[in-house]
Amino acid sequence: MSITLTLADWLSLLTHFLSLSLLAIGGAVSTLPDMHRMLVDDNHWLLDNQFSGSVALAQAAPGPNVLFVALLGWNVGLNASGHEGGGGIAWAYGLLGMVLSMIGVLAPSTSLTLMASRWAHQNRERRAVRSFKQGMAPVVVALLIATGWILSTNLVTVRAHWPLWLLSAVSAVIVWRTKLHLLWLLGAGALLGWWGLV
């Protein structure tokens, strides 16, 4: 895929991620639906499979959850370079996309979190602080459900892969109702995949 980005487009990428950073309650992954809208649907800077692949690769890799933003920016840069085979220009554009995306998503939320956590710790007994914390829980859950919906509707259909959906539902119930460590569920899912059951 080859696209052309102007200086205004690069600034738009940066400012969009700057604004999403302040909405990333519960982590950057909660803003995936709007990233998908901006990068895939509205501007066509990424293909659907590039978007889903970037998220899947970053989530599978060890490290912070926010790595998918770097991969999204990297892929936007590669698409903007027009050099799918690689080379110095592709690397430069990829790095530019990655740096702009990561600065955009990290700078505002990091600054705000530092200031807010210091203030909230000093005022942790105030009713407003306790109310705010309790009120944010449903917002985070709704954003994560929207993220799961966007990613799942792009990948598979329910009928074709019902064992995978069943495994996801059973895992969700187990996590919700028991204190079983997540590593046991990851191991069970890996074994079921190895045996070809999902």
Image (spheres, helix red, strand yellow):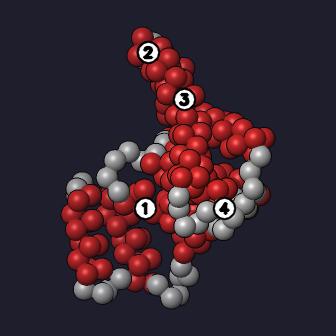
Residue found at x 52% / y 34%? 106
Residue 180 visible from this viewpoint: yes
Q: Are marks 3 and 4 in contact (CB under 8 Å)?
A: no
Task: Answer with the quarter of the image where residue 165 lies.
Answer: bottom left
Residues packed near mark 1 inside 10 Å, few (<14), some (14 to 19) or many (20 plus): few
In the picture as drawn, the residue positioned furthest to the top comes out as: 122
Amino acid type at circle 3 is Ala
Q: Say which of marks 2 and 4 sits in front.
A: 4
The residue identified by callout 4 is: 82
On the picture, is 118 further left or further right than 102?
A: left
Q: Which mark is residue 57?
A: 1
The residue identified by callout 3 is: 107
Q: Are marks 3 and 2 in contact (CB under 8 Å)?
A: no
> Disc 3 versus disc 4: distance between alpha carbons?
29 Å
Residue 69 visible from this viewpoint: no
Q: Say which of marks 3 and 4 sits in front.
A: 4
Q: Position of residue 66 (x, y in %)?
A: 46, 45
The residue identified by callout 2 is: 118
